[in-house]
Image: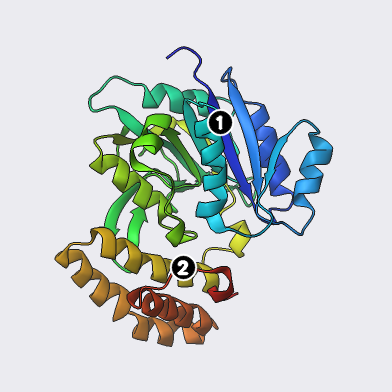
Amino acid sequence: MADPLVMVLVLNWNGGDALVACVESVRKQTHPRVRLLVLDNGSTDGSLDRVIERFPDVEVLRNGANLGYCDGNNRGLERALRDRADFVLLLNNDATLEPDAVSAMVRAIDADGAPPAGIVGPKILWSRRGPDEPLRIWSAGGEDRVRQNVGELRGNGEIDRGQFDRMEEVGFVPGCALLVRREVLEKVGLLDPDYFAYLEDMDLCRRARDAGFRVRYAPEARVVHDASRSTGGGYTPGRKYLMGLNSIRYLRKYGTPGQWLAFSVLGIAGLAPALVVESVRGNARVVCAKAKGIWHGLLGRRAEPGMIPR
């Protein structure tokens, strides 16, 4: 495909100065046809205003409230489908693209092979905390492994020594930076809004694979991620509540008896020893939040902003 149109969706919710860096990285892409749409979920920290001041021509869609990751991005996906974008890149507001990242993902998604690739994700690196710190991997794609949680990021926390420098098929790629072909969305639908946030990327990739599309990891495309700025870090009550709730939702849709057993032993029964350990560290609220999320998932509840602990 010659110069396909790639629509980049950046969903913002109180993203702070990171949003400016994210938008700037999109504007520096070498791919000739990139269109950026900033979706704002009712931010109150002035981050959207700073972007508009810095980039007056930026295209913005104001959602007016915190619709969550799924509904917030779905507004943009609907716009992309309406405007006939060839590909859509979901990009976190705390992530920055290297200049050739979009071009590399487009090359990877159109690489030879059958069935065709429908979704591609880049190598995602943790942002450096110091000038001498080695580059560490946040994600080299992911696999559908059920343990304490549903799904596992490949290489998470490992020093990048080139061990994930081969393009290959994976179970899923995280929504932090996920390039999806328009035909996938037309065939399997948008993000499932019942997830609100977390595991919706696994769900979309699973539906794409079930529809006959490949999900591919492209290491030549690189993204730097300051992970979980919007939730205050990776180990918070809000994140763990949603992970517990959505793990049950995902298992209800796709889980095998073996996966249910693994999650029951490692994810549910493991809460008691985790509570003992994390109480000593002052993190008892986090474990309790995950237990509450699992319980709400078993009750069939849907995530709502007022239910998510902070």
Please rate how many residues cluster around mark 1, counting C-alpha atoms within 10 Å: few if below 14, some from 14 to 19, many from 20.
many
Q: At x 29% / y 27%, what residue is drawn? A: 116
| Residue at the left extreme of this rendering | 257
Callout 2: SS: helix
| Residue at the right extreme of this rendering | 53
Q: At x 51% / y 67%, what residue is drawn? A: 239
| Nearer to the camera, 87 or 258 | 87
Position of residue 111 measured from the top left corner of the image (x, y, whole percent): 33, 21
Q: Is residue 50 above or below residue 35?
A: below
Q: Which amino acid does label 1 sit on?
A: Met
Foreground: disc 1 or disc 2: 1
Q: Can residue 149 be seen in this view?
A: no
- Mark carried by residue 7: 1
Quadrant containing the N terminus is top left
Quadrant containing the C terminus is bottom right
Callout 1: SS: strand
Q: In this view, does 30 lie above or below 213?
A: above
Task: Give the spatial CA distance, label 1 vs label 2.
Answer: 28 Å
| Residue at the front extreme of this rendering | 82
Q: Which amino acid does label 2 sit on?
A: Leu
Q: Which of marks 1 and 2 is nearer the N terminus?
A: 1
| Nearer to the camera, 255 or 237 | 255
Q: Is residue 180 above or below residue 42?
A: above
Residue that mark 2 sits on: 242
Colouring: rainbow
Position of residue 48 measured from the top left corner of the image (x, y, whole percent): 75, 47
Position of residue 264 measured from the top left corner of the image (x, y, whole percent): 25, 75
Q: In which quarter of the image is residue 44?
A: bottom right
- Mark carried by residue 51: none
